[in-house]
Amino acid sequence: MKSILLYFLISFAIAFVLAPFILWFLKRLRARQEILHYVDWHQKKAGTATMGGWIFIFPLVALAGFILSPTTPLANIAVIAAIGYGLLGFLDDFIKIRGKKNMGLRAYQKIIGQGGIAVLVSVFYYLANTDGRILIPFFNMTWDMGFWILPLTFIVLVATTNSVNLTDGVDGLAGSVSFVYFALIAVMIALVSGFLPIAESQTFMTIAAISCGGLLCFLLYNSNKAKVFM
């Protein structure tokens, strides 16, 4: 637990040091939030910096090399998926900034991108877990889903990424929800750690702690009145 707490603090420190430079760069890039013309109550948020997700993505990328290994295939897949979706979000925001409008990737393009990453992750996850085994917390049970783990993984990934996308744009909402989500993930993994290899459970909890550290720093700039959006 000490090492997990240490990674949380290191992640927060990295994000805390980088955040001012990221905000400065976003302002230089004129990476400003554009508001849909029919969302009147959000007009006051127009011009707020966007692409602030780099504040918590950079610590994860920087620390990944210290925590991932060939003995943690599931954790490796999780981090690669996170980076993949981060790049997709960057592309969406970059198009908005370049065109100076709220429309980035179109809905079907986002679904194709999200679905493509989800398919790759599902396949690699299945290859690393051919029994399709999932853990059922609180009941001390496992369920071997076999092939059906593929569509389940796909649905969970696409649904989760869309949920985060829909909460972004309101001061502190996406950041706080994500922080609570990762904190609970760490607790849940601790509860079922007996069903996972020690290296995997330790690495997953560390990834969750790193994410929480970066998100906590992000919330310093994202809480009301937000200086940057995710």
Image (cartoon, rainbow, N blue to C red):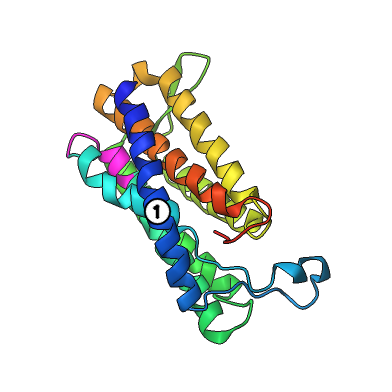
In the displayed structure, 44 sits above or below 8; it is below
Q: Quadrant of the N terminus?
A: top left
In the displayed structure, 161 sits above or below 109; it is above
Q: Residue at x 76, y 66 (%)?
A: 42
In the displayed structure, 101 sits above or below 119; it is below
Q: Is residue 153 left or right of residue 224?
A: left
Farthest residue toward the left? Answer: 70
The stretch of residues the image draws in magenta is 70-77
Query: 99 or 55, which is in the foreground?
Result: 55
The secondary structure that most of the magenta stretch takes on is helix
Task: Say whether residue 75 is magenta.
Answer: yes
Task: Say whether residue 182 is magenta.
Answer: no
Q: Residue at x 48, y 31 (%)?
A: 185
Question: Can you identify the residue that label 1 sits on?
Answer: 57
Q: Is residue 39 left or right of residue 148?
A: right
Instruction: Measuring from the top left, give residue 102's x and y in whole percent.
Output: 64, 76
Instruction: Measuring from the top left, give residue 135's x and y in whole percent.
Output: 44, 25
Q: Inspect the image, locate mark 1, and give the three-letter code of the amino acid beneath it.
A: Ile
Label 1 secondary element: helix
Query: 155 or 189, which is in the foreground?
Result: 189
Q: Quadrant of residue 204?
A: top left
Q: Residue at x 58, y 74 (%)?
A: 32
In the displayed structure, 109 sits above or below 156; it is below
